[in-house]
């Protein structure tokens, strides 16, 4: 059966048998999502002889998280063939609570009247607490490997100032020997000249950097550095991705993350900007060979930022942000995800 959440787009019943005895569902083929272990008939019904007051049977569930099951028992085989659980048919009731309760019932479908929500309970098997199990839900573990890049580098750019031109309002336009720059890249950060004086950068084009003069002092010609406004600066450690809320997020899909696979590398080679389509080059996934249908493994890498056009550095109103900031990227073929730690900070401040 389906989970209790409303799904108005449901097109097929959730009963696990191949066919249904009721005329409404005859000749419809359903992929079996669960089955009894033992000799069953063509409809998946297991006949059980009670040698004692109680008996136990084994039931195999699917590997799909969120699959839900109830098992009904009856001394009459034909009665079982007439039973079903149809999420769409039984999605009746005055509110969500009533609709969810109705969708958990095992019913005789021909007795359900779409214009009468009460008919779902009337169509339910008698004494369900005695002749049907509670709902059993499949949960899956996903095994998580978490890495991070090594120390930050590349966001302080050496340059030689070759020209300083006076600008309006006590500013200077500085031209260096290493351009083009990324437009607006160094906005709100600092230029340090050969005398060690730091100047606030107001803006920059691909050729010039505009700074605010310091008490009428202008930048000196010669060696200088341009510092980006990144939250993480040269030499600082890249943090691991924050997985503190991963349990909460995956629980909605009936998945539980566990951190028990080899890895946890905090020194993956640092890349300042991961260009689109080149994400594989920065992954160092130790657990890839472990991933298989019966053992899910995912990979998270704390990376710095994405391509220049999507790293939100500089701010989104600049010319090269037409694609918008990208906070992370997943590669379906490789099976891992890069979390852009610096871009997340940029967007949040």
Image (cartoon, grey):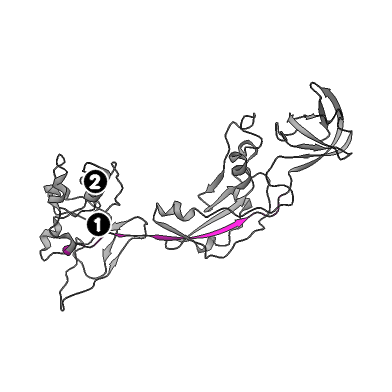
Check disc 2 and report its element: helix, strand or loop.
Answer: helix
Circles 1 and 2, Cβ within 8 Å, touching? The answer is no
Q: Is residue 166 above or below residue 234?
A: above
Q: Secondary structure at mark 1?
A: loop
Q: Nearer the viewer, mark 1 or mark 2?
A: 2
Write down the quadrant of residue 283 in the picture. Answer: bottom right
Name the disc covering residue 99, or none: 2
Image-quadrant location for residue 277 = top right
Q: How would you rate the neighbour count of disc 1 (Cα within 10 Å): few for under 14, some for 14-19, many for 20 or more?
A: many
Residue ID at (73%, 40%)? 228
Can see residue 108?
A: no
* Location of residue 308 in the rendering, given as x and y in whole percent from the top left corner: 65, 38
Q: Residue at x 63, y 45 (%)?
A: 342
Distance, label 1 to label 2, CA atoms, is 21 Å
Q: Quadrant of the N terminus?
A: bottom left
> Total number of numbered labels?
2
Q: Is residue 135 above or below residue 116?
A: below
Label 1, on which residue? Answer: 16
Q: Earlier in the sequence, mark 1 or mark 2?
A: 1
Whether residue 98 is in magenta: the answer is no
Q: Residue at x 33, y 60 (%)?
A: 62
Magenta region: which residues?
A: 130-152
Image location (x, y in percent) of residue 259: 52, 62
The local crowd at label 2, few if under 14, some if 14 to 19, many if 20 or more residues have their Cα within 10 Å, is many
Residue 153 pos. (x, y %): 73, 48
* In the foreground, 211 or 65: 211
Q: Is residue 29 left or right of residue 313?
A: left
Residue nearest the viewer, comparing 137 with 310: 137
User: Which residue is rendered at x = 13% and y = 46% of the image?
Assistant: 119
> In this rendering, would 15 be left or right of 339?
left
Left or right of 348, for residue 42:
left
- The mark found on residue 196 in the picture is none
């Amino acid at each position: 059966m389906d989970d209790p959440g409303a799904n108005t787009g449901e097109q097929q019943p959730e009963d696990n048998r191949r066919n249904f005895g009721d005329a409404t569902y005859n000749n419809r083929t359903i992929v079996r999502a669960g089955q009894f272990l033992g000799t069953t008939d063509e409809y998946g019904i297991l006949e059980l002889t009670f040698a004692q007051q109680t008996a136990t049977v084994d039931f195999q569930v699917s590997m799909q998280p969120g699959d839900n099951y109830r098992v009904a028992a009856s001394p009459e085989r034909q009665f079982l063939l007439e039973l079903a659980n149809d999420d769409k048919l039984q999605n009746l009731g005055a509110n969500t609570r009533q609709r969810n309760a109705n969708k958990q019932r095992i019913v005789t479908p021909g007795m359900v009247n779409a214009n009468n929500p009460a008919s779902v309970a009337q169509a339910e098997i008698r004494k369900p607490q005695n002749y049907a199990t509670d709902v059993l839900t499949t949960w899956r573990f996903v095994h998580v490997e978490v890495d991070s890049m090594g120390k930050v580098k590349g966001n302080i750019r050496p340059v030689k100032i070759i020209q300083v031109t006076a600008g309006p309002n006590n500013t200077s336009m500085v031209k260096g020997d290493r351009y083009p720059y990324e437009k607006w890249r160094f906005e709100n950060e600092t230029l340090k000249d050969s005398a060690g004086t730091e100047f606030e950068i107001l803006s920059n084009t691909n050729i010039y950097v505009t700074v605010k003069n310091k008490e009428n002092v202008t930048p000196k010609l010669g060696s200088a550095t341009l510092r980006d406004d990144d939250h993480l600066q040269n030499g600082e450690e890249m943090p691991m991705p924050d997985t503190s809320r991963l349990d909460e997020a995956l629980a909605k899909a009936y998945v539980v993350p566990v951190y028990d696979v080899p890895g946890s590398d905090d020194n993956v080679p640092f890349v300042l900007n991961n260009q689109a389509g080149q994400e594989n080059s920065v992954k160092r996934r130790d657990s890839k060979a472990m991933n298989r249908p019966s053992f899910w493994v995912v990979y998270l890498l704390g990376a710095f930022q994405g391509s220049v056009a999507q790293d939100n550095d500089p701010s989104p109103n600049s010319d090269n942000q037409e694609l918008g900031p990208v906070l992370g990227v997943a590669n379906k073929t490789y099976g891992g995800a890069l979390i852009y730690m610096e871009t997340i900070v940029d967007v949040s401040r």
